[in-house]
Amino acid sequence: MRFDVVTLFPEMMDALAAGVIGRAQKQELINLQCWNPRNYTHDVHKTVDDRPYGGGPGMVMKIEPLDAAIDSAREQSPSAKTVYLSPQGQPLTQDMARQLSSEEGLILICGRYEGIDERLLSKQVDLEISIGDYVLSGGELPAMVLIDTVSRLIPGVLGHADSAEQDSFTNGLLDCPHYTRPETLEGEQVPDVLLSGNHAEIEKWRLQQSLIRTRERRPDLFNQRELTRQEQALIEQYDLMSKTSSD
Ligand code: 9D3
């Protein structure tokens, strides 16, 4: 899959050379190319911002260099969907990532300043995506988040060890707790069941922990999700256990 990133700060994408995404780039499972609007300016100052109509504080990205940079990206990736990372976008979900992972390419537009001209949005953009309700300085980190989460879903990018199947959210639940050596850390023991070698019991315990944690920490996710009979039973067993131990 191709990612063409339109950004005033291409060096930020160098961070994607680390870890599994770096390995995927080396293997050419994903290809990343940046397009800097500054290289499409014609004035001596290489101006990439402009004043907002209507006045007020802040600047807007200048149309022509951004428009030309997007056109160049599309020449390299004609079938790509064009995504504008913006606080006004649809919140990114695992489901959207899954859908996007079947595209041949994505052109990712990173805004700076107050954003881009609305007419450029209608002319050049298919999809507007946010990564959550907090304020960032621009679209680069969101583009990197999108590249990371989409790339992990491309066959071959993840090793067998952490295949996407087992991840939290693929089943709508938070992950269970994890433990490694030593068996006792500052008086705190690893749960007995994990040392039992009983893999059926271990799987049940992990599912139960996932259910309880999701109900505690993310009632929004929990309430969205249908429970199987087994899951319902595991929750009831847990609640009985906690009631008994608090008496
Ligand atoms: C006057 C209000 N503006 C500045 C505080 C609004 C504003 C403009 C540009 C707020 C943030 C940004 C830059 N952010 C992004 O480009 C961005 C973003 C984000 O800030 N949060 C979550 N997802 C995204 S995707 C792109």
Image: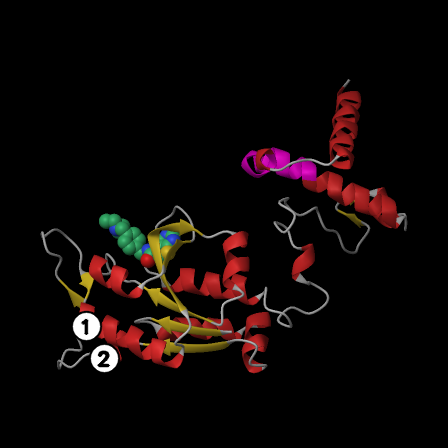
Can I make out residue 88 in this image? yes
Q: Magenta stretch mostly in which secondary structure?
A: helix
Q: Residue furthest right?
A: 197
Q: Residue at x 63, y 45 (%)?
A: 174
Q: Secondary structure at mark 1?
A: helix
Of the pair 9 and 71, the residue shown nearer to us: 71
Residue 21, given in percent of the width and then of the height, sits at 55, 71
> What residue is pinned by disc 1?
64
- Residue numbers of the magenta segment: 211-222
Relative to the observer, which residue lies in front, 124 or 17? 124
State the residue lying farthest toward the top: 247
| Label 1 crowd (10 A; few <14 / some 14-19 / many >=20) | some
The quarter of the picture where the C terminus appears is: top right
Q: Is residue 216 magenta?
A: yes
Evaluate if marks 2 and 1 touch, with contact meaning CB atoms under 8 Å apart. Answer: yes
- Please determine whether, in this image, residue 54 is positioned above or below residue 9: above
How far is the residue under mark 2 from the one under mark 1? 8 Å
Quarter occupied by residue 213: top right
- Residue on which the image places disc 2: 40
- Quarter-wise, where is residue 226 in the image? top right
> Is 66 part of what is drawn in magenta?
no
Q: Residue at x 70, y 47 (%)?
A: 177
Q: Is residue 31 left or right of residue 244?
A: left
Q: Amino acid at mark 1?
A: Glu
Above or below 93: residue 76: below
Q: Residue at x 79, y 27 (%)?
A: 241
- The type of residue carrying mark 2 is Tyr
Give how far across and how far down residue 243 sits, in percent: 75, 21
Q: Quadrant of residue 108?
A: bottom left
- Please rate how many residues cluster around mark 2, counting C-alpha atoms within 10 Å: few if below 14, some from 14 to 19, many from 20: some
